[in-house]
Image: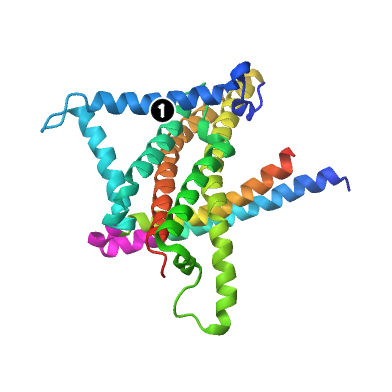
Amino acid sequence: MDPVAFKFLGAGLACIGMGLAAMGVGNIFGNFLSGALRNPSAADGQFARAFIGAALAEGLGIFCLVVALVLLFT
Amino acid sequence: MASPIEQFQIKPLIPVLNFTNSSLFMIGTVAVIVGGLMLATSRRAVVPGRAQSVAEMLHDFVAGTLRDATGQEGMKFFPLVFSLFMFVLTANMLGMIPGFFTVTSHIIVTFALAMLVIGTVVVYGFLKHGTHFLGLFVPSGVPAWLLPFIVVIEVISFLSRPISLSLRLFANMLAGHIALKVFGGFVVSLGAAGVGYAILAPLPLLMAVALTALEFLVAFLQAYVFTVLTCIYLNDALHPGH
């Protein structure tokens, strides 16, 4: 097979990681929401922490995006 | 048709001075911040007007975030954190105006901001705590045989901080603007494809409108996340012990 084809395959495979990161971020906010509905008075204090967790989980997905972009455009 | 990544092209405006459209929008961002805040606080009143309320809200928001993460002694970093938040927020928001250049969609800009933060953490940490600052890499209460591995992991996670901090902001801006351009391109190509396809053209237009709303959310959220992570890293410089 053509090496360029493998490049595009690799970029597509890297995007799987972004889907996994989406699961992680959804997990964080889903659990945050279910906790917040049980104890709404404590929700505001943990808001920043939920965003930090989401930002860290999202960062790993963004590494995948960068890998895909590097494969596509270099 | 223009490629979706053409919008990120850097064009020299004054080649002799290396003055590019990126420099122009950076100066514009600073001008908007300084002008807006000066205008808002020019007629100070005990009962704030609309503009003054916005300025006070921004100040209290960033101050609250910083105080929550670092405590009262972290407030000496308030000018740095507030400048970073306002610069990233305004640059993101200005980038949302069609035809405008997004300063933060270039990794060298966000990397410079992230290195400023990490550089401040390292310099301040060593100045304040000396070699004690290295205790950041040695968590307490870890079994002795596990310690070498933990230290290696902590060092790697510390070194990856500037990369992840800058990549997050850059990639969010890049991906969002590319998605907007791609959906804009769908509208044009469906409209040009013939009568049968042209009636479908409003669908990607609706999507582009929804994405624009999402991008405004992301623009604010990434500025907030950048600020929160800055506060957490500064907290490491202030209290390096685990």
Kind of residue at badge 1: Val
The residue identified by callout 1 is: B30
Question: In which image quadrant can residue B81 be found?
Answer: top left
Please tell me which residue is depicted at 55% across the width and 35% down the height of the picture.
B105
Magenta highlight on residue A66? no
Rendered location of residue B65, percent (x, y): 31, 50
Identify the magenta region: A30-45
Q: 10 Å neighbourhood of mark 1: few (<14), some, or many (≥20)?
A: some
Residue B167 seen by the camera = yes
Relative side of B82 to B189, left or right: left
Question: Is residue B59 or residue B131 the one in the foreground?
Answer: B131
Q: Describe residue B140's horizontal placement relative to residue B144 as left or right.
A: left
Q: Quick check: is A34 in the magenta stretch?
A: yes
In this rendering, is residue B115 above or below B236?
Answer: above
Instruction: Find residue B6 and report its horizontal and vertical position in percent.
Output: 64, 26
* Res B50 quadrant in image: top left
